[in-house]
Image (tube, grey):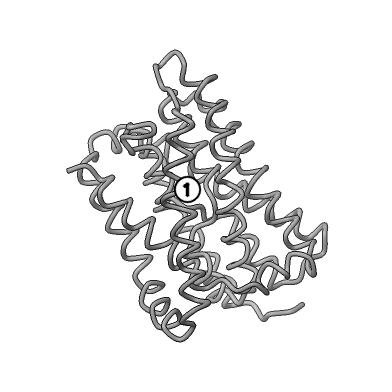
């Protein structure tokens, strides 16, 4: 069974749900709170890819895993970050807007960075990125569902709220289903590389969060903003990384998706721990 037929519907539904939560005022906040957005977008769009490339070179990862690790870092924020931000006492509106912005911006940045990485790191291994196919897939699976969600929210706001209530609860179980199916199919390869790859994805999460925390403190973001920024930087859209890696139209390489599978597991462990720590601390501005 090809997991692409599981991941594509999940990714489409997640992006549709994101569109259901968006309102015009969410984007207006970018202008009113520039420091928070500068830190978050810098962390996600600049620091994450640089950290992933550095870790890949440091551990001398094989090309397929090197590209898979960088692919995670180039993806937008995960939709579950909104729920995690709420649980951590963060700024949910900021989280929603950041997830939407990175989903749109990475439509451009992901093909650019991955095209360069594939050409430099994957040439000898015969790994090639059809950029045109990636753009088409992202427009179909990322942009179109978000636009449809926005239209539904605008035309039928009450229905959008009810649909979001159901889909937001299904997001995490759906991702875990995908991870489980993929793990069962590729457990031999995963176990063979789990030591190095597990360490790499964990370092990616921790180093990115630490850098975002430092930058956030330097720019004096509020506590709510810092909590949201750390979660946004630490939670990438693993479903999209798996879709890009395993899609017959793009890389068509399920081994490349293994870093994303391990990342999705460690991401939840690290951020659930962070949420638990946040709950123990009084919220001070």
In the image, is residue 58 above or below residue 243?
above
Q: Residue at x 57, y 60 (%)?
A: 99
**Where's residue 104, x and y in %?**
58, 53
Most extreme residue toward the top is 124
Q: How many circles with numbers are drawn on the protein?
A: 1
Q: Residue at x 56, y 25 (%)?
A: 57
Q: Quadrant of the N terminus?
A: top left
Could you classify mark 1 by the number of other residues whose Cα lies within 10 Å: few (under 14), some (14-19), or many (20 or more)? some
Q: Quadrant of the C terminus?
A: bottom right
Left or right, 37 with respect to 44, comes to right
**Where's residue 200, x and y in %?**
49, 38
Q: Residue at x 49, y 62 (%)?
A: 146
Q: Residue 85 is drawn in which quadrant?
A: bottom right
Left or right, 152 with respect to 277, comes to left
Q: Residue at x 79, y 62 (%)?
A: 34
**Where's residue 32, x and y in %?**
80, 70
Q: Dot 1: what SS?
A: helix
Closest to the observer: 194 or 237?
A: 237
Closest to the observer: 102 or 44?
A: 102
**Where's residue 183, x and y in %?**
26, 46
Left or right, 254 with respect to 210, comes to left
In the image, is residue 132 above or below residue 152?
above
Most extreme residue toward the right is 219
Closest to the observer: 254 or 4?
A: 4
User: Mark 1 = which residue?
Assistant: 139
Left or right, 233 with respect to 214, comes to left
């Amino acid at each position: 069974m090809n997991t692409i037929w599981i991941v594509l519907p999940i990714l489409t539904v997640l992006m549709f749900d994101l569109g259901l939560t968006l309102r015009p005022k969410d984007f207006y906040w970018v202008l009113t709170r520039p420091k928070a957005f500068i830190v978050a977008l810098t962390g996600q769009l600049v620091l994450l890819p640089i950290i992933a490339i550095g870790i890949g070179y440091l551990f001398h990862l094989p090309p397929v895993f090197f590209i898979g690790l960088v692919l995670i870092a180039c993806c937008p924020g995960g939709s579950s970050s909104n729920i995690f931000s709420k649980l951590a006492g963060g700024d949910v509106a900021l989280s929603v807007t950041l997830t939407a912005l990175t989903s749109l911006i990475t439509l451009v940045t992901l093909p650019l960075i991955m095209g360069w990485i594939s050409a430099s790191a994957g040439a000898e291994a015969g790994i090639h990125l059809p950029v045109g196919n990636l753009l088409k897939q992202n427009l179909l699976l990322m942009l179109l569902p978000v636009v449809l969600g926005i239209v539904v929210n605008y035309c039928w706001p009450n229905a959008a709220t009810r649909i979001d209530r159901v889909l937001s609860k299904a997001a995490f179980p759906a991702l875990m289903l995908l991870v489980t199916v993929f793990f069962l199919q590729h457990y031999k390869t995963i176990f063979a590389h789990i030591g190095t790859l597990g360490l790499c994805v964990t370092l990616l999460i921790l180093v990115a969060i630490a850098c975002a925390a430092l930058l956030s403190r330097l720019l004096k973001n509020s506590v709510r903003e810092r909590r949201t920024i750390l979660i946004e930087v630490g939670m990438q859209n693993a479903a999209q990384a798996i879709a890009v890696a395993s899609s017959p139209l793009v890389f068509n390489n399920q081994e490349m998706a293994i870093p994303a599978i391990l990342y999705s597991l460690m991401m939840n462990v690290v951020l659930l721990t962070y949420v638990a720590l946040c709950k123990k601390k009084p919220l001070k501005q």
